[in-house]
Image (cartoon, rainbow, N blue to C red):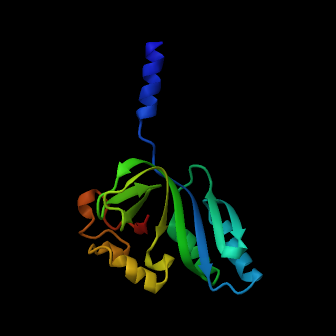
């Protein structure tokens, strides 16, 4: 009995891989239902997307993913752009291990690196929802506002810079910038 209890405690103590579970994407430039449908079709064709639910009232696409699929947020943005529109907002829901975020720290979620711009000292864990604020995912005005929250150069390029290499983030890795 003690062996079984110990085994369960060990299993429960193992770290859970941080995983993006769903995203909500807002598209801009939509003028009619055909526009909305074109974006939905483009998102449905992305290899790792399982389901796209359209919220017409909010011009929002709620996207879920295939199990164990490698998720690429840039691919979602490219699909919207290829349909002739742009991304006005991207909110991500992810399951993460309990942790305290330090200022300008980069964390890995679903094989992607995220730099939280406004989370110094915040505790996150279980299910967390955040907004991606990179150039291709917000307006120019919003990007200027959020990029001012850090002096790190990766916010401008979206790629690993000398500011990020000390955190064991691979060279030339894509860094997504986010706010909680």
Q: Is residue 167 visible?
A: yes
- Viewed as shown, does residue 130 lie left or right of 87? left
In this view of the protein, which residue sits in the foreground, 33 or 73?
33
- Viewed as shown, does residue 77 lie left or right of 163? right
In this picture, is 9 found above or below 167?
A: above
Residue 95: % across, % down = 50, 50
Q: Quadrant of the C terminus?
A: bottom left
- Which residue is drawn at the image coordinates 53% and 58% (left, top)? 93
Q: Looking at the rendering, which quadrant does residue 164 occupy?
A: bottom left
Q: How many marks?
A: 0
- Which residue is drawn at the image coordinates 67% and 84% (left, top)? 30
Q: Looking at the rendering, which quadrant does residue 33 occupy?
A: bottom right
- In this view, the residue farthest toward the top is 1
Q: Is residue 45 visible?
A: no
- Which residue is drawn at the image coordinates 71% and 82% (left, top)? 35
Q: Looking at the rendering, which quadrant does residue 60 occupy?
A: bottom right
- In this view, the residue farthest toward the right is 33
Residue 133: % across, % down = 45, 73
Residue 87: % across, % down = 56, 78
In this picture, is 164 found above or below 35?
A: above
Residue 83: % across, % down = 65, 80
């Amino acid at each position: 009995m003690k062996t079984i209890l110990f085994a369960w405690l060990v299993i429960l103590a193992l770290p859970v891989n941080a995983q993006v579970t769903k995203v909500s994407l807002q598209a801009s430039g939509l003028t009619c239902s055909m526009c909305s449908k074109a974006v939905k079709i483009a998102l449905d064709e992305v290899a790792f997307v399982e389901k796209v639910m359209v919220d017409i009232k909010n011009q929002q696409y709620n996207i879920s993913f295939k199990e164990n699929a490698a998720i690429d947020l840039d691919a979602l943005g490219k699909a919207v752009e290829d349909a002739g529109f742009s991304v006005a907002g991207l909110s991500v829901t992810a399951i993460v291990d309990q942790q305290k975020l330090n200022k300008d720290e980069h964390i890995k979620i679903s094989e992607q690196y995220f730099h939280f711009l406004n989370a110094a000292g915040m505790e996150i864990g279980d299910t967390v929802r955040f907004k991606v604020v990179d150039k291709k995912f917000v307006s120019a005005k919003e990007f200027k506002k959020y990029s001012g929250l850090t002096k790190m150069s990766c916010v401008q390029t979206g790629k690993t810079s000398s500011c990020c290499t000390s955190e064991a983030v691979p060279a030339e890795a894509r860094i997504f910038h986010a706010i909680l």
